[in-house]
Amino acid sequence: MSDFIHFCHALSENAKQANIRYLVVVEGDAGWTNELVGAFLNRYKHPLWAGETSPEHIPSVSLKKAKQFLGRECDCLIFNAQDAFDAEALGALSGTVTGGGVLLLLAPSIWFRQTDEQSPFIRRLIGLLSLPDVIQLRQGMPLPPLPVVSSSQGDYSDDEFGCLTPEQFEAVAAIRRVVTGHRKRPLVLTADRGRGKSASLGIAAASLMSERTLRIGVTAPAYANTETLFAHAARRLGINNAPLGRLVFGDSELVFLAPDALLSDKPALDFLIVDEAAAIPAPMLNKLLRHYNRIAFASTIHGYEGTGRGFAIKFCQQLDVVTPQWRQLKINQPIRWADNDPLEQWIFNTLLLDAEYAALDTDSDVVNSDDIRYRYIPTDSLVGDEMYLSQLFGLLVNAHYQTSPADLVQLLDDDAIHLVVAETKNHVVACCLLSVEGGFTPELARQVMLGQRRPKGHLLAQSVAAHIGIELGAIQSCARVLRIAVHPDRQQQGIGQLLLQHCRHWAVAEKLDYLGTSFGMVSELVDFWCKAGYTPVRLGVSKDAASGSHSLLMIQPISPESEGWATQAQTLFAANLNAQRVEQYRELDTLLFSQLYFSALDGVAQLPHYNTHLTEQQVRIYANGGLGYDLVVASLEVWLSDYLSGKQQALDTNDYMAVAKILQRQSWSTIVSDYGFTSRKMAEKSLREYVSLRAQ
């Protein structure tokens, strides 16, 4: 072990000299591993243990809570993968290791001895662990040679702001110009982790506060995302022990405001900083952009709060419309470690954080759709073809800016995931991911419909049963379109529609009953899916946290059995949309509401002849504890009108409560106040009991 101790000492000295970080794979029994870890811990003062079985004397974090450590730092990360491996946690925590540090990956021996039995992602991971920049320390094996390193980059001096690189100085100057320059010229600042983006925001805010009287607002998905920003601002202003999220300097103030509070209160601000903007729903960003005259958006490009590349592409299209004089700046040079850092390069390659869709050559990649072929690809066949996998994942990242390493693991490992692609002779130009769901037993489907069971996954099948009340939708087999992406240079050419046609062919061959999709509702997506033959059957009452929009569920029946209930679901959707338009959807964008309402007009026109069986079925499910008021309000309206018309005796208090809520659509707060309930929950419970007693 003395040789290993000497090796650990020399490796850590190399890392510190070059200001780089190493990935060290440790594989051996518990005693040998603990001794080796101890040798590294003797060289570092700020270790962090990630995963299970952490020693008491070392700060630790569970893999599930890894993101809570974002923004903090350590110099020796021990990532225990012996009991479990989490790609998201590895990626997130790797960025906390400072220059000169190491990441010790404690790998289970089975990874290297029984590779054929491992999941596709782990098989791919094992191959990448053999790359030259990875240091492998394995019990019973000779020590590897020490890597050859060169000195770190030269020093940079900035007396004005204290910046550590020329690019950081440029970033601070650009942030300041948003305030000192013309109005309506937002800045979009992007950078990989470790480039000093948050520090630049804090330095710029502090310098502005020291020069003039300003109220600067900072917003982000959570305050934890802005801790570095506030720390640098406080340090520059010489402020100690300030309350969390608020710095006061003279008559100036820097304050954190949650995105929802910012939009609801719309406080007066001289300057707004939006950090980790890729993790904030685009509709919220658009509202902030239109309300505040001086605003800077910042986002991590390859981070874990949302993928900044997709954000930059999609949100910048909105900037072109609203504020065409906006500016963009990217920080490339690392601050916390040197260029060409071995750990960063390995993490990027392994988790495909820098995956790019193919650069198409119009001379060799023919635009004509007849020259594009469509085919089904087994996802495990992607292991071993890094170029193809990178092109594919690059398309997904570009199309969906919440794509994360967990999606890569799911793509390779989940047996329910299926892949259909569109290709030219050289490149991937479109792809579609589908998840096979459903196939529940009648008993399980009924329990799901009544809200008694929620099996993991199967979101489409469960939504049809639990949110519409059609248990056959969970008994049948279906496929949910998880993601569809078309190369930016090949959009608006019908490729997406043809891709969905091939997905339907595949579903028919697999003897599935129906297809479906769910997405944050925007006008162009509704048009796209309607054109592909999908029909809306459910609109979420509350907005989705990720997209900031109402989620729309659309289906396309395949089998004759599914066509029958699909028609019922469409009728229910039309009835509910008509009934919900005043209460649940009064704030919905008029364009979107009209788009859905007119597509459902046939169903709305038939409401006087509303299917009695459907009404009774939904009311019965509601009475037995399933569904919910918002999901069955149309059926409740028909039922209550029918019930009251045949009621012989005078109405009582319970009847009046039902009329107030179901027919008059009075708010729950009014019902609670007027009828003496202690909470909305109690009022909802009372309404369900009312229906249950009278609908038997």
Image (spheres, helix red, strand yellow):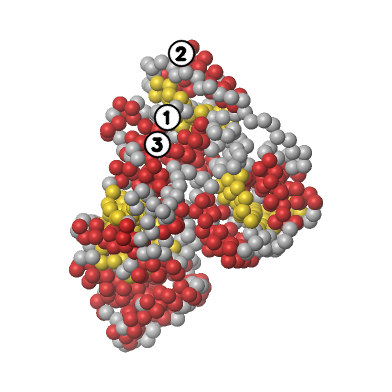
Q: Is residue 656 left or right of residue 257?
A: left
Residue 576, position as x, y percentages in the image? 37, 75
Residue 83, position as x, y percentages in the image? 38, 33
Q: Residue at x 59, y 33 (%)?
A: 338
Q: Residues within 10 Å of mark 1 (few under 14, many from 20)?
A: few
The amino acid type, in three-letter code, at marker 1 is: Leu
Residue 205, position as x, y percentages in the image? 71, 50
Secondary structure of the residue carrying tag 2 is: loop
The amino acid type, in three-letter code, at marker 3 is: Phe
Residue under pointer 2:
1
Secondary structure of the residue carrying tag 1 is: loop
Q: Residue at x 61, y 25 (%)?
A: 151
Residue under pointer 1:
131
Q: Residue at x 31, y 51 (%)?
A: 419
Nearer to us in this view, 352 or 614? 352
Label 3 or label 1, whichever comes before in sequence order = 3
Q: Quadrant of residue 663?
A: bottom left
Residue under pointer 3:
85
Q: Residue at x 51, y 45 (%)?
A: 302
Task: Using the numbered discs, state the Cα–Cα distance from disc 2 to disc 3 in whole angstroms.
Answer: 27 Å
Q: Of discs 3 and 1, which sits in the foreground?
A: 1
Do callouts 2 and 3 mark residues in contact (Cβ within 8 Å)? no
Residue 129, position as x, y percentages in the image? 41, 30
In the current view of this chain or complex, which residue is farthest to the top? 2
Question: In the figure, 190 relative to 49: above or below?
Answer: below
